[in-house]
Amino acid sequence: MDIRNVPLNDLILDPNLNLRDRLDDFTVERYADSWDRLPPITVYEVDGKWLVADGFHRHAAAVMLGKRSIPAEIVVGSFTDALDFVASVNLFHGLPLSRSERRRAVELKLKLHHDWSDRRMSEELAVSRELVAKIRRQLIEGSQIPNSPGRIGSDGKLYTSAGIPREQPERPKGKPADEDDSAERGRRGMGAAAAPPGEATAPTKAKGKGGPADEIHRQGGPDSITVAAEGPIPVAAPTIDELLDLMSRQVMQVITWTQADGFVDSYRSASPNARGLFHAAVIKLAARADQLRRS
């Protein structure tokens, strides 16, 4: 990892690498107040030029403080590499992206990886598959990306029957078809959204005598994680007490994994995107738990 103090005057602020609609003045002031605790910005060295890829608010804070240089992690790559990095990293830390900024990130990522499946794209960007499918359809109809005959799934395999994403069920007027729909389905107690053609889904487990919650708990290991990721359990399954008990066990299992020998060293060597996905999930869980506590 190449981290050094880079002169502000040597940095290029390319608007194509900034997903933000605008800089947030409050965030800039907050960063200026906590300057010594801020991580380095990320700069891509492209053809001898230093392009800011992550850290526009921190750069503005440095200017506000009258700094002449700023700590930066230098990554050598192409402009496309920088775009690919920007489309993911801004989703997972700092000031949360607005709805329009999230959509811009999905659009950019689809233009770079139009052959990825909706599921893989949604997992990469921590947004719903419905949002990915909707934006993909718009880009295909606008001839901005091709309608690939196959899609590459999260497992790296090519699925050749993907086709154009199918239409989503009609929604009430005034309700946007974006990532908020996933949360709404969870509140209604519905199961996970069906995968688009060509995208594998986890096999359905038979229910044991102890009920769905006990069955999932008995599975343990990766299978239980897969089941948890598939979405809320159908309405006819466990009581709320059973469901909360199951969820508590799964959260504690994750905590136990982070306490395993060697996890800290492995975590440090993980990619920024993998760490960002983990942080985003933890932050969302904590925020949701706080909402439930206050309700």
Image: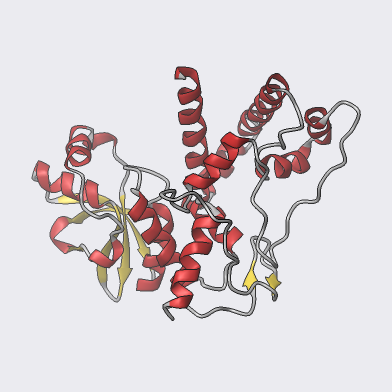
**155 left or right, relative to 214:** left
* Relative depth, front residue between 72 and 245: 245
Query: Which residue appears at 68% of the width and 22% of the height?
Result: 240
Asked whether the viewer can see residue 78, the reply is no
From this view, report whether residue 264 is shown above or below residue 164. above
Position of the N terminus by quadrant: bottom left
The answer to whether any part of residue 65 appears in the image is: yes
Residue at position x 73%, y 42% from top?
A: 227
The residue shown at (64%, 35%) is 189
In the rendering, at what x and y percent does residue 16 appear? 28, 67
Q: How is the image coloured?
A: secondary structure
Left or right of 295: which side holds 2? Answer: left
- In which quadrant of the rendered view does residue 44 lie? bottom left
Q: Position of residue 132 (x, y in %)?
A: 51, 60
Residue positioned 46% across, 77% down in the render: 141
Q: Which of the two residues, 274 or 120, is positioned nearer the viewer here?
A: 120
